[in-house]
Amino acid sequence: MMNFEDFNISANILKAIGDMGFKKPTPIQKMAIPMALKSLDITAQAQTGSGKTLAFAVPILENIFIPDKSPQAIVLCPTRELCVQVADEIAKTGKYIKKLKVLAVYGGQPIGKQIRVLKKGVHIVVGTPGRVIDHIERDNLDLTGVEYVVLDEADEMLDMGFREDIEFILKNATFKRQTLLFSATMPEEIKKIAKNYQNNPKFIKIKNKSENIPKITQYSFKTNPKHKFDDLCKLIEAYDIKSALVFCNTKRGVDFVFKNLKKMDYSSEALHGDMAQKTRDKVMNKFRNGNIAYLVATDVASRGLDISNLDFIVNYDVPQNSDDYIHRIGRTARAGKSGFAFTLVSPQDEYSFGNIKSRNKTVIVERNIPSEAEIENIKNKKILTKVKQSINEEDFDKYLKIIKDNSTEDMTVEEIAAGLLKMMREN
Ligand code: AMP
């Protein structure tokens, strides 16, 4: 059994950790803190909820030199939400370090204020890659004195297209730095970044024990009652949600969503407490067997539902309280599988959703409703990914020959490709 005291860290950090109510280090903290304190680079596979923020906050704070007011650590996170959360947790952990300045920088927030704070001097910057680069290019942020670079949720950042930005930042940060990389998954791309930009990193993998937090990716989306239903449809399109359990708070809400989904030709059914038990069972069975794509339900109706292979939960309405939220999202990611839980948040739900977020064990990442253009892009990319796969298949040459033989000046190879894409899109 290990305690925070065993890390040999400053009393003021220990005191702050005590104030946060943490009794024992989590597995990632047990492994990463001692390594990072020894100045080693780390590549850690750990999920949100594992306590990874504290795992990098402690070694950074332990080595901050307060009289030097230039940034000594930079933490890159995929979203604004996460930046704020991480900056908060670092500030809390360092609350007894006098004059410590931690700043979150992210897009969407007026840049002027960030510039003023940066000019006054900050020790730790937590930012989204895009905004960090903005500050570097405007000479507000100088990375030459940075001793720590943290890539938080690296896989998520790559998925969001931040690869070049991350590489730019790593190239700009001093060579002597220590680089700590955290990622829920370890695809090749992440390993490549580790290889190219880390110095002999130690690999850590934290297993997600089944009794640990299930692997539910939780996103929230700001919406408005006026276009909430359209936003739901956009999510269905953009995330390719083939089947989902959609929660509403009222029976009226259930009816509204279910009827409108039907109008859009989505196969859906309603499930609420006013329905006869027999009908409810019938609907449930249809959903279980995959004969209904979207089941729109109230909380009461969902009690005890155990559906395997349910990938998506959508909270069309923000649940009344955090217990309902946990209960709803727990319908996915059963038996060690993973899943997604999306929540649509209207302005009037912000307060109750704030409560849910603060009680939630894991992070609910805020994302934007995809635009029409983004949805278009996603659909095209999906087809092109499939095309790419088929190019590697054995009998591909046969098809290549057909195209070559049939291409003319009036119908070039490029035009044939575009025509095929158009046909697939219209199908
Ligand atoms: P993270 O994976 O960093 O997002 O952390 C997930 C949650 O666990 C956050 O709410 C942390 O405040 C909390 N946490 C971090 N370390 C510990 C610990 N040693 N014991 C209990 N909770 C912790």
Image (cartoon, rainbow, N blue to C red):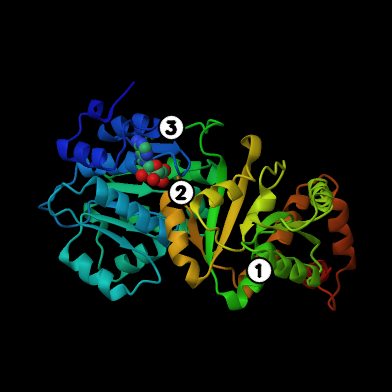
Residue 216 x/y as whole percent: 57, 46
Discs 3/1, front: 1
Q: Quadrant of residue 238?
A: bottom right
Left or right position of 129 against 427:
left
Left or right position of 42 against 211:
left
**What residue sits right under mark 1 in the picture?**
234
**What residue sits right under mark 2 in the picture?**
360
Which label is found at residue 204?
3
Q: Is residue 388 above or below residue 317?
A: above
Secondary-structure class at tag 2: loop
Which of marks 3 and 2 precedes in the sequence? Answer: 3
In the image, ligand 1 is in what quadrant? top left
Residue 149 x/y as whole percent: 32, 48
- For image coordinates 81% across by 48% down, the residue present is 281
Discs 1/2, front: 2
| Inter-mark Cα distance, 1 to 2 | 26 Å
Residue 409 x/y as whole percent: 83, 77
Disc 3 residue crowd, few under 14, some 14–19, many 20+, Cα 10 Å = some
